[in-house]
Image (cartoon, rainbow, N blue to C red):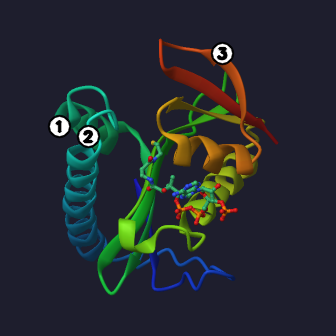
Amino acid sequence: MITMLLNVFDGKRPIRFVVGLGKALRILLLHTVMYRQIRELVLAQQAADPAFIGRDVEKYLDKLFDKAEFIVHANKGQCQGFVAYYCNDYATLIAYITLILVTPACRNSGLGSWLVDCVIQQARKRGFTACQLEVHSDNENALSFYEKHGFRHIRDTGEKTHLMQLEF
Ligand SMILES: CC(C)(COP(=O)(O)OP(=O)(O)OC[C@H]1O[C@@H](n2cnc3c(N)ncnc32)[C@H](O)[C@@H]1OP(=O)(O)O)[C@@H](O)C(=O)NCCC(=O)NCCS
């Protein structure tokens, strides 16, 4: 499921639009375009940083498009950043951010923070009480980004991967 966020992020006061709910064909087209762009962004990041996904990227993306929820920020039809997350574990009430990516040109302008805030809002609305994610210890940008948002280390999940959690 993709919630489209179009031309709305000005770095200060994001406004959210869910486009044309009645227009299934248009939405399908937008989804297809966004999925293609998201795939390209992920592959480009993976090429720049081989540790980024750390597993079969195509297989991982297929699973994401099949099962995860996405919030996308697009400007003039171009995806500038997105977050993929799960918010469906009603047994634990813990949401899980599986992937967040902002295009290099748009980094450090608050877009990543906005995407994380959107997930937290969604999770809260559904009665969830926490959000988790996994981060690679070599990814210092991401570590400090998540710490800035209040995520704290819970446990190591691998030699270089850490589980972090934010309680609401
Ligand atoms: C992590 C990421 C999503 C942050 O998005 P962003 O739009 O740049 O983030 P924001 O502008 O909202 O926040 C910036 C914060 O991130 C951190 N950060 C971003 N770039 C950084 C850098 N080059 N060095 C150190 N910290 C950095 C800082 O905490 C910064 O806080 P500040 O504004 O107080 O300095 C983005 O850098 C990205 O897409 N990285 C590549 C993909 C990735 O590593 N994803 C996370 C793992 S799945």
Residue type at tag 3: Arg
Task: Answer with left or right where residue 4 lies relative to residue 112.
Answer: left
Where residue 19 sits: x, y (%)? 43, 78
As helix, strand or loop, the secondary structure at mark 2 comes to helix
Count up the numbered dots. 3
The answer to which of 45 and 79 lies nearer the viewer is 45
126, above or below 11, in the image: above
Residue type at tag 2: Leu
49, above or below 27, in the image: above
**Which tag, 3 or 2, sits closer to the chain's start?**
2
Looking at the rendered image, the disc whose residue lies closer to the viewer, 3 or 1, is 3
Q: Residue at x 55, y 68 (%)?
A: 108
Q: CA distance from mark 2 to mark 1?
A: 5 Å
Q: CA distance from mark 3 to mark 1?
A: 28 Å
Q: CA distance from mark 3 to mark 2?
A: 26 Å
The answer to which of 144 and 61 lies nearer the viewer is 144
> Badge 3 is on which residue?
155
> Badge 2 is on which residue?
61
Badge 1 residue CB within 8 Å of ligand 1: no
Graded by Cα atoms within 10 Å as few (under 14), some (14 to 19) or many (20 or more), the crowding at tag 2 reads: some
Quadrant position of the C terminus in the picture? top right
> Badge 1 is on which residue?
58
Q: Is residue 116 visible?
A: yes
Task: Answer with left or right where residue 113 lies relative to residue 167.
Answer: left
